[in-house]
Image (cartoon, rainbow, N blue to C red):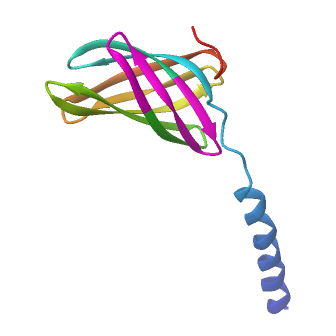
Amino acid sequence: MMRIFLAVCLALAVVAVPAQAQAQPRAVSGTWRVDFVTPLGQNWIIMTINQSGAKLSGHATDEFGEYEINGRVVDDQVTVIWSVAEDGKMLEITMKGKLETATVINGTAKLGDVGEGPLTARRTGDAGDVR
């Protein structure tokens, strides 16, 4: 009886793993306006996110230039990293947030070892849109 129980449990585990492994990550591709506050003050960027599965790429643009982004989405958690020149050195900015709805991400922006602050991103268009 115990062997049958173990065999049934194993069979259920084998069926459940592929179904879970094939779960698609949440869609975050598109154009986003990202507003964040740090010890350096209020900042904003326009971020265009391209998505391939869980992997994110694209670019962030502000009044000073355009920066390549890389990141990941796991469940509703979004992480995006980019670097900007600050006082002759590259400063890595890490955005971590929760996809609250299809159009809003809330979280934090961390600027290297300078500090971090609250962040809100709002989707303004599809990946092909420029606004």
Q: Quadrant of the N terminus?
A: bottom right
Q: Quadrant of residue 37?
A: top left
Q: Nearer the viewer, residue 65 or 117?
A: 65
Q: Is residue 101 left or right of residue 121?
A: right
- Residue farthest along the left direction in this orientation: 87
Give me the residue at 60% from left, 45% from top.
54
Give me the residue at 46% from left, 19% from top.
120
Give me the residue at 54% from left, 18% from top.
32
In the image, residue 66 lies in the stretch drawn in magenta: yes
Q: Is residue 17 left or right of residue 52?
A: right
Q: Quadrant of residue 27?
A: top right
Q: Nearer the viewer, residue 105 or 63?
A: 63
Q: Nearer the viewer, residue 2 or 19?
A: 19
In the image, residue 59 lies in the stretch drawn in magenta: yes
**For the magenta stretch, what is the residue range?**
48-68
**Position of residue 108 measured from the top left corner of the image (x, y, whole percent):** 38, 28
Question: Is 113 situated above or below 123?
Answer: below
Q: Quadrant of the C terminus?
A: top right
Q: Main secondary structure of the magenta part?
A: strand
**Position of residue 77 measured from the top left corner of the image (x, y, whole percent):** 53, 39
Q: Nearer the viewer, residue 121 or 58?
A: 58
Q: Is residue 130 left or right of residue 107?
A: right
**Position of residue 103 measured from the top left corner of the image (x, y, whole percent):** 62, 19
**Position of residue 87 measured from the top left corner of the image (x, y, whole percent):** 14, 24
Question: Is 17 situated above or below 36?
Answer: below
